[in-house]
C-alpha cells in the first residue's frame, strides 16, 4: 500500500481517482488547490503525487517544486508537446492527458511505484500469497505450478483488484493487442486459476463484461 496525494481541483475527478486507487489498496489523501497541496507536502511524506497542472492559486508546476523529490504523475487537459516536455524536464515521472481511463492511471501508478521501490512486493489474501518478485503463487505456503500466462493473468487481477475488467481488456493486458485468439482464452485461464488457487468465490464473473477479483481489505 502506498500513500498517495491526489491534487485535482475538479471534485468529481479527484473523487473518482481516490475511489479507484483506494480499491487497489492504496491510501489516498485529497487536495483541491495548490496552496493546500503544498502545505500537505511540507508536513507529511507521500510515496506518490498525482498532480493536476491547472490549479487555483499555485499551479501544478509550482506545487511540484515544493514536492521535495516525491515521485509525481502530472495530469492535465493540455495536450501540447511543450507542456509535456516541461513537466518531464522538471523531473516528473509520468504525464497523463485528460480525458484518461482509470485503468491506465492505475497501471501508470503501479509502474512508478515499482520504479521507486514503493510498490507492492507481495500480496496476501486468506491462504493465497502472490510473490511479484519471484512470479510465484503460494497456497498455504506451498508453491502452485502456474503457466506463465496463468501467472500474468493472476497478477493483473491482483493489481487491479475490486475493478471489473472486460475480457477484451484482459486479453490486451496479458496476451497483447496482436493476439489473434478469442476471448474464450480468458475464460479457460480464469477457470484454471479458480481451481488451482481455490478462488471460486473470489474471482467474480461480471455479467456481460468479464471478471473481477473481489478483495475485502
Image: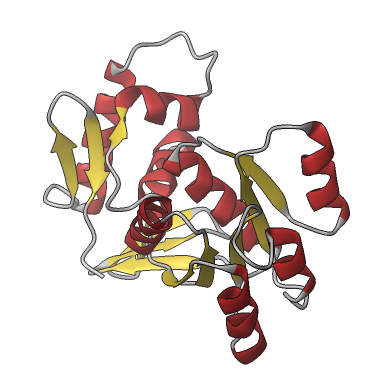
Q: Residue at x 34, y 65 (%)?
A: 142
Q: Residue furthest right?
A: 89
Q: Is residue 120 visible?
A: no
Q: Is residue 137 visible?
A: yes
Q: Quadrant of the C terminus?
A: bottom left
Left or right side of 139 for 216: left
Taking 206 as reference, is 87 above or below it? Answer: below
Residue 51 percent location from the top left of the image: 61, 59
Taking 97 as reference, is 63 above or below it? Answer: below
Left or right side of 110 for 190: left
Q: What colour scheme was applied to this rendering of the protein?
A: secondary structure
Left or right side of 88 for 121: left
Residue 93 percent location from the top left of the image: 73, 55
Q: Nearer the viewer, residue 52 or 199?
A: 52
Q: Residue furthest front?
A: 57
Q: Residue furthest bottom?
A: 43
Q: Residue at x 43, y 70 (%)?
A: 28
Q: Residue at x 80, y 33 (%)?
A: 81
- Quadrant hosting residue 215: bottom left
- Quadrant hosting residue 209: top left
Q: Residue at x 24, y 68 (%)?
A: 127
Amino acid at each position: 500500500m502506498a500513500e498517495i496525494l491526489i491534487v485535482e481541483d475538479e471534485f468529481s475527478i479527484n473523487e473518482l481517482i481516490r475511489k479507484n486507487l483506494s480499491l487497489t489498496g492504496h491510501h489516498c489523501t485529497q487536495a483541491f488547490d495548490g496552496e493546500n497541496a503544498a502545505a500537505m507536502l511540507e508536513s507529511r511524506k507521500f510515496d506518490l503525487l498525482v498532480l493536476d497542472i491547472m490549479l487555483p492559486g499555485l499551479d501544478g508546476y509550482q506545487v511540484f517544486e515544493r514536492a521535495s523529490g516525491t515521485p509525481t504523475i502530472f495530469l492535465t487537459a493540455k495536450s501540447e508537446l511543450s507542456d509535456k516536455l516541461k513537466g518531464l524536464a522538471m523531473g516528473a515521472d509520468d504525464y497523463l492527458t485528460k480525458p484518461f481511463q482509470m485503468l491506465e492511471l492505475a497501471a501508470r501508478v503501479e509502474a512508478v511505484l515499482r520504479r521507486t521501490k514503493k510498490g507492492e512486493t507481495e500480496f496476501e489474501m486468506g491462504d493465497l500469497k502472490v510473490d511479484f518478485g519471484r512470479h510465484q503463487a503460494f497456497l498455504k505456503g506451498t508453491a502452485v505450478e502456474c503457466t506463465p500466462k496463468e501467472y500474468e493473468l493472476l497478477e493483473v487481477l491482483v493489481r487491479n483488484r475490486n475493478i471489473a475488467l472486460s475480457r477484451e481488456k484482459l486479453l490486451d493486458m496479458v496476451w497483447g493487442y496482436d493476439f489473434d485468439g478469442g476471448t474464450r482464452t480468458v475464460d479457460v485461464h480464469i477457470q484454471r486459476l479458480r481451481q488451482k488457487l481455490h478462488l471460486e468465490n473470489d474471482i467474480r464473473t461480471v455479467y456481460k463484461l468479464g471478471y473481477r477479483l473481489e478483495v475485502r481489505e
